[in-house]
Amino acid sequence: MNLRALLIAALFPAVCALAAPPTSLTFAPAGPAKGKHIVFLTGDEEYRGEEALPMLAKILSQRHGFRCTVLFALDADGTINPDNQKSLPGSEALDSADAIVMALRFRGWPDEVMERFEKAWLAGKPIVALRTSTHAFNFPATSRWAKYSWNAKGDWPGGWGKLVLGETWVTHWGRHKFEATRGVIEAAAKNDPILRGVADVFGPTDVYEVYPPADAKILLRGQVVAGMTPESGPATQAKPRKSDGKTQPVNEPMMPVAWTREVPNPSGKKNRVFCTTMGDAIDLKDEGLRRLVVNAVHWGLGLEVPAKADVRYVDGYEPSFYGFKEYRRGLKVADLDLGKALPKPPPLPAPEPKQPKKKTP
């Protein structure tokens, strides 16, 4: 082999490595570093976590001094595909995680990813869980991870979500895409550090029916509002609870939408857990909700919660509206890097009012 061929052979792997598109994002801390690594797990088919979590990671790295890594569900060509429930490249980042922020739904990750996730959880890492993370996992009954599934029976009824976060999927309590959520601070929790600087909270996603356990500290309850704007008044209808079939007005009492737990795990360690059933990408345009999540990260890590955390966007933020199959097509990890902002998505058509069903004579 001549010298030229040897040089090409030697340089080829390095050239390929430089040309390979990134499969994850890592943001170095700006300003004084807190020495903590936060790993963000995206992968939900409906609520655009792939857009929301990079925005939060930028805030926590550039405004608050954390090192942040964001992982995505990807197709083989590097395109972000939240429908790919088995994908999470870069999961080795979990090995050095000090905290986990997750926006997941019905994931069925391969063994090596689940092993890393389980190890981080059992090590007692704090967990901040958004929206559909209550039903993060969905495995076949024959899988070694079946007990993690949202609908698991046996030792972990309700799966990992119920065991750790305090709830799994029950049902929509407000009318999906017709009735939004106003977050109301629980009076008994008004002095909780996670609520520092948090006043009004509003999001266009609906309230979930949830029943956190007795050891959960409720921070916010969700007022079902009769519309999709902050000006909408409270909804007044009653409906049967899925849990027991009893009917109640939707706001009497209001369902919890944010809570904390400090819960022992099977290894004997204890995890600090913050869970909110809000947290869609559009919800997180709300300053109060962003501050709630940023505060929860500080609390989970045992750090002092700022009096009024800086939650200004680092780059522009124009998220897509929620919905199945409505994620941005062709989106690459590099499109969400520091210094980049996604263009504003086209407006969605107004939903058509539901027509009453015709009675069969």
Image (cartoon, helix red, strand yellow):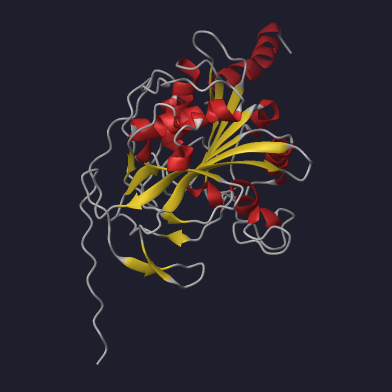
If the image is split into quadrants, where does the N terminus sit?
top right
* Residue 190, x across and y down, in percent: 44, 35
- The residue lying furthest to the right in this view is 267
Residue 288 figure quarter = top left
* Residue 132, x across and y down, in percent: 49, 49
* Residue 141, x across and y down, in percent: 69, 63
Residue shown at 55%/52% (left/top)? 212
Q: Which is nearer the eye, 310 or 335? A: 310
Residue 355 vertical placement versus 184 (above, below): below
Residue shown at 56%/55% (left/top)? 168
Q: Which is nearer the eye, 71 or 181? A: 181
Residue 184 figure quarter = top left
Residue 345 vertical placement versus 178 (above, below): above
- The residue lying furthest to the bottom in this view is 361
Is residue 85 in sight in this rendering? yes
* Residue 268, x across and y down, in percent: 78, 40
Residue shown at 70%/29% (left/top)? 95
Query: In the rendered view, does 253 fall on the left or right side of 38?
Result: left
Is residue 75 in sight in this rendering? no
Residue 229 vertical placement versus 248 (above, below): above
Q: Tag count in the figure? A: 0
Residue shown at 57%/46% (left/top)? 216
Query: In the rendered view, does 51 fall on the left or right side of 101?
Result: left
Q: Which is nearer the eye, 6 or 288? A: 288
If the image is split into quadrants, where does the C terminus sit?
bottom left
